[in-house]
Amino acid sequence: MEAVIGLLLMLLGFSHGVETCDGRQDGAQCYGALGGTVVLQLMDNASEIFRYQLLSNRTVILAGRKNQILSNLIENRSSFTPINGTFRINNLSWTDGGEYSLEIFDSNGQRSEQRTLNLTIQAPVSSVLLVSECLSQGEMRVSCSSEGGDSPQYSWTLDGHTLTDAQLLSGKNESNNITLKQDVSGQLVCSVRNNVSSVSKKEKISTCGFIFINCTINMTHISQWVLEANNTLCIEPATTPTMITDTVSVPSSDVPWYISECKLTLLQWIY
């Protein structure tokens, strides 16, 4: 499994960062990326320490005396710098994870100090997929998924600002599936991270073509979201012109007039 994940990361061209951790405090929690590098700060300056050794799973992997390194079990992929007390481990594997114990001895061979740190190895997040779809009432469901990555954590922003409850119909800003309200649009970004990596994906989203109707027609109140293209609500019916008929009396003259009572039509005979 480890070889498969390592090969996948190489094929994707993923660039590992260097994680640093201060192990000078007892019980420190440190993280390293699978295939990457971690730098453990074990002490301030080893040249001032008479003798020291670092154990992993009860096996001494590093031993030294002041500025002299006596042994390094993984020297093919690690290095210790006495002047600043840092231990650098490259090409991390799952087996590098676990508890490390640092023991310091005085000139009499007595252990004067002991402290531990825990190193957790995580597969980094390599890519993010963002999928959106419109629902029946104009809401938008958006799903964010990551490829690879242990213990992924999700977060969302819209136009550079964290999503608020006023914009969310369901889901939380920390979940990977959310449903946006009908009027939400803008630059949506999903970020996925764990302790050793962070990747994001953005998408320009627009409303699903719905409008909010709020009116009263024939004493009936209508308040709902409707598809604008098919909307027939809250639209006043067109008014039909009224046909008017009347009788017009015309004084007698030399020119005879014949008057019809239908639509005010006048016929004139000209002699």
Image (tube, helix red, strand yellow):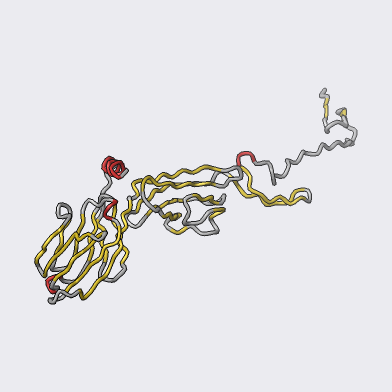
Seen from this angle, which residue lies furthest top? 271
Name the spot of residue 195 as percent of width and height, x first: 34, 57
- Rendered-image quadrant of the N terminus: top left
Q: Is residue 20 above or below residue 175?
A: below
Residue beneath the point at 41% across and 44% down: 129
Left or right position of 77 against 155: left
- Looking at the picture, how far across and down is residue 194, in whole percent? 36, 55
Q: Residue furthest left?
A: 68
Q: Is residue 102 above or below residue 244?
A: below
Q: Along the line of sight, which residue is nearer the eye, 165 or 55? A: 55
x 32%, y 64%: residue: 29
Residue 189: image location, x then y, percent: 42, 51
> Can you tell which quarter of the image residue 99 is in?
bottom left
Q: Is residue 200 left or right of residue 265?
A: left
Left or right of 104 on screen, residue 161: right
Quarter of the image with the C terminus in it: top right
How many numbered circles does the render carry?
0
Residue 225 placed where, x, y %? Answer: 63, 48
Q: Nearer the viewer, residue 102 or 12?
A: 102
**Residue occupying the point 31% across, 67% down:** 28
User: Which residue is pictured at 15% across the width and 62% down the height?
Assistant: 80
